[in-house]
Amino acid sequence: MPRAISQFERGRIIALINSGVTQRQVSIELNISERTVRRIMARFNAEGHAKPSPIPGRPKILTEEDNNRILDSIQQNGFQSTRQIISNLNINCCEKTVQRRLRDLGYYHHIPAQKEFLTANHKEQRMAFALEHLGWEEEWMCTIFSDEKVFSTDENGKITLWRTRGMRYAQENIRFRTRCGRITLAFWGCMTSRGSRPLVRTTPHMNSEEYIHILSNVMMPYVSETFPGITYVNFVQDNSGVHRARIVQDWLARQPNLRTLNYPAKSPDLNVIENLWAKIVREWDPQIRRTREALAQYVIDKWEGLRARHALFENLITSMPQRLNSVIEKNGGVTRF
């Protein structure tokens, strides 16, 4: 069955031919058969318009006014379900009818990107960090990325939205994170271009002393083992209260072979270990893992599986220049990473 020619395409055909382009050239440029081009022009010359003939059969349930109201509604809030759209607009039709109409309008159901909400100050800090380290390549290969991750057994279910193609990271289509949910387990992990070490299970609300103990007794031996003979290693951690504590900062300052980077707040896209956490969460089904023991075993097993994928770590590290360029292109805003 030949594809339908949109009103926009019909208008382009008429405009091109009226400007002197031949029907054959129009056919090639628009990828429309020459026969169809002739038919559209014949209708335009005879009737003064090129609208398609009415399609026989049952009339459409939704009027043009309904379509416009649906479009306005979804542009204002793409996170609505089709049931909510029908209820809010008081339209007399089923959900599948609205779904078909949205697809006709170019909107498809997707899982939204989840990103941190950034203030102007956050964006300024991110730009400064990206510009400062833009020329780094080999330096990232001697950098250790660390982070803590809290897992919960009652994660929220998947949220979807309607959007057009190529608009995943538009501001209105992003689901910004909030820190909520019942905490059940917490872990500390680290990674470099050469791999990672086993996870460390921490208390749910780790304090400065516990954090220093992990850095001193877990991370530093790993650094010495992984980078023997190197003068110093760059260190990335986020800006949590524990990390910013004076006692922690003083401890870090006393480490001659560790250089702590001035990591910008709200920037998980610049800490590549976040990609490892995401891989663990992505395959986690909270419906079948309701106990601490089951959750802990799942997290540890998944982490060990990732550790076996040696190329993964180098690929993540070598993505840092691209991440920094993306931050600059977005003027410090959210990126796809």
Image (tube, rainbow, N blue to C red):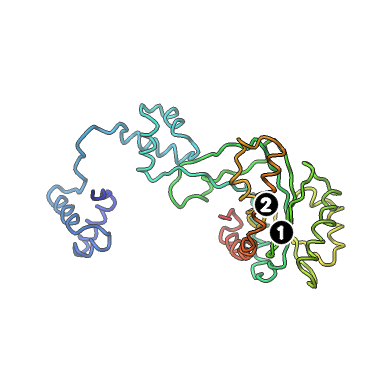
Residue tagged by mark 1? Answer: 196
Nearest the viewer among 194 and 34 is 194
x, y percent for residue 282: 59, 46
Q: Which mark is residue 115?
A: none
Nearest the viewer among 181 and 300 is 300
Q: Is residue 179 above or below residue 2?
A: above
x, y percent for residue 234: 75, 65
Q: Secondary structure at mark 2?
A: helix
Residue tagged by mark 2? Answer: 303
Under mark 2, the amino acid is: Trp
Under mark 1, the amino acid is: Ser
x, y percent for residue 266: 67, 51
The mark that comes first in sequence, 1 or 2, is 1
**Quarter occupied by the C terminus:** bottom right
Nearest the viewer among 291 and 64 is 291
Labels 1 & 2 near each other (Cβ < 8 A): yes
Q: Is residue 290 above or below residue 243?
A: above
Q: Place residue 14 in its image quadrant.
A: bottom left
